[in-house]
Image (cartoon, coloured by chain):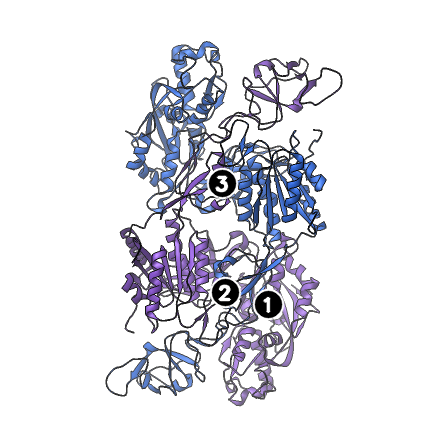
Chain colours: A purple, B blue
Amino acid sequence: MGIYLQDIPLSEAKARLRMGLIRLNRTGILGKEEIALDEAALGRVLAEPVWARQSSPHYHASAMDGFAVRANDLTGAQPGHPRQLEMGSQAIYVDTGDPLPAGMDAVIPIEDTQPVYADAQPADPRHPQAILIRAALPPWSHVRALGEDIVATELVLPAGHTLRPIDLGALAASGASHITVCRKPRVAILPTGSELVEVGKAAQAGEIIEYNALMLAAQVMEWGGIAIRYPITPDDEPLIAARVQQAAEEADLVLLNAGSSAGSEDYSARVIAQLGEVWVHGVAVRPGHPVILGMLRRAIGEGAALVIGVPGYPVSAALTGEIFVKPLLHGWLGRAAGEDQTAQAALTRKITSPAGDDDYVRVVVGRVGSRLLAAPLSRGAGVITSLVRADGLVILPRGVQGVEAGAQVRVHLLRPAAEMERTLFAIGSHDLTLDLLAQYLANPADATRARRLVSANVGSLGGLAALRKGEAHLAGCHWLDPATGEYNLQAVRTYLPDTAVQIMAWVGRVQGLMLPAGNPRGIHGLADLADGEVRFINRQPAAGTRALLDYHLQKLGIPPESIRGYDQEEFTHLAVAAAVASGRADCGLGIAAAARSQGLDFIPLFTERYDLIIPGEYANNDLLAPLYEVSQNADFRKAVQSLDGYDVARMGEIVLQC
Amino acid sequence: MGIYLQDIPLSEAKARLRMGLIRLNRTGILGKEEIALDEAALGRVLAEPVWARQSSPHYHASAMDGFAVRANDLTGAQPGHPRQLEMGSQAIYVDTGDPLPAGMDAVIPIEDTQPVYADAQPADPRHPQAILIRAALPPWSHVRALGEDIVATELVLPAGHTLRPIDLGALAASGASHITVCRKPRVAILPTGSELVEVGKAAQAGEIIEYNALMLAAQVMEWGGIAIRYPITPDDEPLIAARVQQAAEEADLVLLNAGSSAGSEDYSARVIAQLGEVWVHGVAVRPGHPVILGMLRRAIGEGAALVIGVPGYPVSAALTGEIFVKPLLHGWLGRAAGEDQTAQAALTRKITSPAGDDDYVRVVVGRVGSRLLAAPLSRGAGVITSLVRADGLVILPRGVQGVEAGAQVRVHLLRPAAEMERTLFAIGSHDLTLDLLAQYLANPADATRARRLVSANVGSLGGLAALRKGEAHLAGCHWLDPATGEYNLQAVRTYLPDTAVQIMAWVGRVQGLMLPAGNPRGIHGLADLADGEVRFINRQPAAGTRALLDYHLQKLGIPPESIRGYDQEEFTHLAVAAAVASGRADCGLGIAAAARSQGLDFIPLFTERYDLIIPGEYANNDLLAPLYEVSQNADFRKAVQSLDGYDVARMGEIVLQC
């Protein structure tokens, strides 16, 4: 204890790192090595410019199959007055690529000649006795002159260039057989923590599957380095110190994962201070605070190794890679600075940010109508799916405390921009079939029909609100009108009064009570929830399932206040099921398939219609057409039907077009 | 002979290929394999969707270092009325990540508690006798509930997804230890041709260094396949047939390089027809015509292999890879269709195209002022540097016979769009120092100052014309005014009368006659060129060197018609030197360094000033600032000075600012 982190701004951390690199003489490339010019050179970075050793072509080469001639001999040739050239002295047959015979200065394609044979019998047109030619041609016609492509001594490729397939060809054409490339940085990755277990081992409560090292190693490989993964080291300070020292001997950079905050078992800073220097401990970046930057002295080898203490939360770990490891490797590889691809997009909802931090907000990006939209994802440092799902990062710099909904933000894209042009934004009620739909949309028989479905779960009313603001292509909705007992029609009329929409029936599904297996509390219906003991887990107010609950509670005369946990909210059926399965709650209301997926008991109570609401402007347009196709796909319908409590009888039916 | 190719449209060729794939049942992925979830999985493509096997977190985990409590016990706690919780029964110390002890439902961070010790002596704050808490908190505060990130059974990643570092983490978090990925396609690459020699061997006239196979292998690797390179096979039909059959047994796709046209030694189509089927022979694509598409029956194994006869010209070979091999591999890997990144740009000069072909035009792309410009590169199928230098491809579809200068075209980008924003377009006179300048601009000490110099060699007047049209950031110029004997001032006044420009002195250089070593024709000055025997090689009319020649010929009273080869033109000093070195010409006018680079004799005749002309709007702006810095860089000046006949005394001096 007693270590209180003093976070410093990111710019300051980068400046200290740069000073440290200068002091260690580690700012440029790490070294050069000569390698053979073969396919293993793909992706390597040239350490020196390559100047052509030979020209290409390195001789005057025929560019056609035909006859090498002297252009002078053809002067005056015309259709009516052909010139006759004798084979051998005046014309010589050449294939494409053959050297131009001495004395000749042009090639005439075989199809522009007329053979003259000694006897009447036609023979091999390459070897007549003479040829007739009916047009003059300039010298050097149909000849690839020496150096047409590359002239010896010319620059072929500059230093710092990352080699692509075509570059390998150009280097070979210019006479190179070996090339000098930048040595690959060696990066040691040390996972530490007594709570860690290897991938593939069963993890008990309190144990964590170690995958940060896997992720960091893959990042290092992607950025051109060599990753050296160490086994998990438990929280044993002398053992960690010994491993760190060993890593410093063999690597240019040591990534010491976890143990970098100030908790009771966080040894990293002490170990680094003991074996080298701590330059930075704590960077005001969110997520990711407890980053350590420093160096390790080598005991045996020359010089020093860089070290980065990487935070344990996976999103923090991955972003530490992006922010610190990637630029280090690029610099060490002599790579020209690669700017991020960026795009301007409108933020779909307000985000707030601590004023003191550079805040990396994960967003999904898609074009809805004419606008490119960025929808913020979960902010938790532990939510790795937020990075998996992210299309880009919005960086809110220090000093910015938040950005309003609708504001234009710059998104650093993590996917090709073209993907965002074929993205369907589904915002609204959560349903398990949306995952299946995403699968079918992504992999159609005709690849040009592939679509990416991005869904945000904000409940039925949240979806209608998104449609009203023009922020979604479709919204899942199952909103019961208490007056009529009808689904969705009234909600659409109320919340989208001025918008042309189509309501497409999607699935019928069964809602009911999810209970721990064996139903230990003996619950049989909604009336049993009001006993003050049963811990209920609810959905958020905009959710159709919440409306369904409220409708039936009212009919039964049960006051919401009488239900313990009525104010505990989750955003999806699966999250409610998980809360019950984990013992956080005794009961929840949701769909049968979610209960089944978590091994819960289920008491069916109601059937309901879950529809897709689609603004008229997108109905049947090219972007959404594959959605209509999937709704009629027999395989897809079968897969949905196989889920508990699902009915596809009306799937794809247009319930309302207004 | 006798095979006359009937080119078919690209769309028709693709349709026939697709029909063939359907018939062979080869349209989907080639197969699945299970691999361990480790860093080798990076870049692999999921063959099946991955559903979560376990939740993440898989238990309720403390999100802070602090005390696990029951939220109920804190009801009513206020700053002035703390609640005291007894250790063990009411509060239990937990580190971040520890499981929430049974019965507890929240965590209070240690910094929000006040320890109570049995004796007055402060001890370990994790183990007091009790804690005082001065604020209530809701249940599940500071707890990462089971399933917060991933709920078991949820979709983690869809089939067809290419794995990134972060995905490996998410898969591990969801309980995966092995994953099912698409089998990598195996591609055999067979270079054929008696004229071919291996990379690294000295090539004689008529011999060609074999690098298409290297390039194709690298393409296959880049697109996710396994490349199997065969040794060079000479033009021996039975031997080629035997190797092709062998390749068909072990590969999914055979690339048979060269021999695909209808020349005298082109066996490919016959061999394929004999061992399988030819579906397509000749595709109306430029460059690239003689492509063969077909199949090969297996003699030993099951099924068949695809085969592509790849044309021999390197640009054709590389584009055949892009057009046919890449989509095949993507389909076989189950990858979602990856659209090209494209951009709209204005064409800098007219291009014409055969009406019957899909024409792939290589262009360089850069932003000049507010306009993105695309400048066409050499069209030759043999000019591999045109692909190396290309930033993108403009595809002129069949039926389009040309596009006018200034028209907007869609460019399929081969480089990140951001690179084009830091590109300097230099259009004008050619000088050897531009290559050196490109090196220094690309690799500054401060990576944010890196610039890409793209230069097009169109002569001094061509450069001024480009500036007038707003198509360049700078133009190299050495245009002698015959009236005054002054360089560049008059030309700028004449050709850019309404434009504010800066003239920056760049280099002084020596122009003279380039002659074969030993000067076999005994040439001593311009007067010797008019003997009717000496074969001269000239520069194009817009070139400053051409103007220099004409100026002095006029002074000497030598009529241009008296010089043999006056109408033979090259576009650069190096190309002129190469023409002389290769025996294509006996003499040329150009700079000393170019002569020296090709081992030529040189007779110095004139010294001249080569300046950079920069429009006022770019002078000293952020984009061009690094150019001014390099002009003052001592290393750079030294490197220039070391070239024959160069003088840097006035480099960087502003000669005119108007």
Q: Residue furthest right?
A: A121
Q: Position of residue B509 (x, y in %)?
A: 34, 25
State the residue in front, A368 or B173: B173
Q: Position of residue A469 (x, y in %)?
A: 53, 62
Q: Which chain contains the residue that carries disc 1?
A: A
- For label 2, the residue is B170
Q: Amino acid at mark 2?
A: Ala
- For label 1, the residue is A476
In the picture, residue B212 is in which quadrant? top right
- For label 3, the residue is A168
* Cα distance between the residues tagged 2 and 3: 36 Å
In the picture, residue B189 is in which quadrant? top right
Q: In the figure, B642 relative to A564: above or below?
A: above
Of mark 1 and mark 3, the one earlier in the sequence is: 3
SS for callout 2 = helix
Q: Amino acid at mark 3?
A: Leu
